[in-house]
């Protein structure tokens, strides 16, 4: 089973028909409203937004609608492997907006999509990228950001939670529905890639539905990697932004231009 198919079981957090996703959307609106007040976004009458690994585009749409409330124009480009999810972005928008969708891997070169003022990766997505892939992803982002551009990455300090605070579990219930439950199980560590393989099973019946190589990142590790590519790199903690339903946010600004 592909990652796209596996995530068809694990998508309540971004499905427009889900009450939890609707609450999540309001939390994102509140966060971006705070970010605008704190002058964390580039200046401009109109901002070009790129939402990577976007799913249904919930984060990019929340930023676009928040900009509208502040009288700032904008366009939104969303990238994900799952076409069916990308088509649902309109559900988050109050009016017809300038939105483009691209079905592609976020590790591909997306320079052909143009230049952007704000790049988002939301929803704890970095666990899908090992350190080598994360480095490639960050370099790709730098290539498409404007000189004053901002990259915001919502993440959780999984290393601290799982290993320092000893919250790691070999078996985890990922989602529970009326007629099935999905659990994941630790199936081994890869020291070369720095990832742990999680096997996913559907109960009852123990039907194997897929596997994911997972990297348990710490916030400082991601911020430090980004510091090599951006003039400004810092972590905006949950206590600082104060929005319930939004995790820590790693904030990068002013990409360092790479030599050809």
Image (cartoon, rainbow, N blue to C red):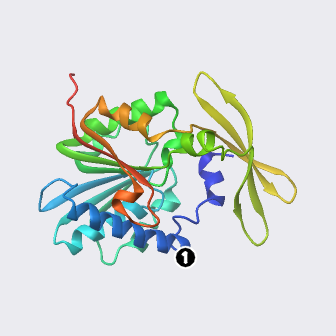
Q: Is residue 31 visible in this depiction of the protein?
A: yes
- Relative placement, left or right, of 240 versus 166 is left
- At a point 55% along the width and 76% down the height, the residue shown is 19
| Residue 156 drawn at (x, y percent) | 49, 49
Q: Which residue is mark 1?
A: 19
- Relative placement, left or right, of 206 versus 249 is right
Q: Residues within 10 Å of mark 1 (few under 14, many from 20)?
A: few
Q: Note whether 230 is above or below 37 in the view shown.
A: above
| Residue 200 drawn at (x, y percent) | 73, 48
- At a point 46% along the width and 42% down the height, the residue shown is 105
Q: Note whether 15 is above or below 152 in the view shown.
A: below
- At a point 64% along the width and 53% down the height, the residue shown is 5
- Quadrant containing the C terminus is top left
Q: Note whether 142 is above or below 240 in the view shown.
A: above
Q: Residue furthest right?
A: 205
Q: Secondary structure at mark 1?
A: helix
């Amino acid at each position: 089973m592909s990652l796209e198919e596996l995530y068809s079981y694990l998508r309540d957090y971004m499905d427009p028909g889900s009450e939890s996703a609707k609450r999540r959307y309001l939390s994102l609106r509140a966060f971006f409203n705070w970010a605008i007040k704190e002058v964390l976004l580039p200046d401009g009458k109109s901002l070009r937004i790129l939402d990577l690994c976007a799913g249904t585009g919930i984060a990019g749409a929340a930023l676009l609608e928040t900009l509208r409330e502040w009288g700032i124009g904008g366009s939104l480009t969303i990238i994900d492997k799952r076409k069916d999810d990308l088509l649902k972005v309109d559900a988050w928008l109050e009016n017809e907006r300038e939105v483009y969708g691209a079905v592609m891997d976020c590790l591909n070169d997306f320079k052909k999509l143009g230049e952007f003022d704000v790049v988002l990766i939301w929803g704890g997505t970095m666990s899908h990228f090992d350190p080598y892939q994360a480095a490639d992803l960050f370099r790709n982002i730098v290539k498409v950001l404007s000189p004053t551009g901002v990259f915001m990455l919502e993440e959780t300090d999984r290393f601290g939670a799982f290993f320092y605070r000893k919250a790691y579990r070999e078996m985890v219930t990922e989602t529970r529905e009326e007629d099935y439950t999905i659990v994941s199980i630790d199936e081994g560590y890869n020291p070369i890639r720095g990832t742990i393989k999680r096997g996913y099973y559907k109960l009852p019946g123990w039907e194997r539905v897929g596997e994911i190589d997972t990297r348990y990142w710490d916030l400082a590790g991601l911020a430090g990697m980004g510091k090599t590519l951006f003039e400004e790199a810092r972590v905006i903690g949950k206590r600082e932004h104060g929005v319930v339903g939004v995790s820590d946010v790693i904030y990068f600004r002013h990409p360092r231009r790479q030599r050809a």
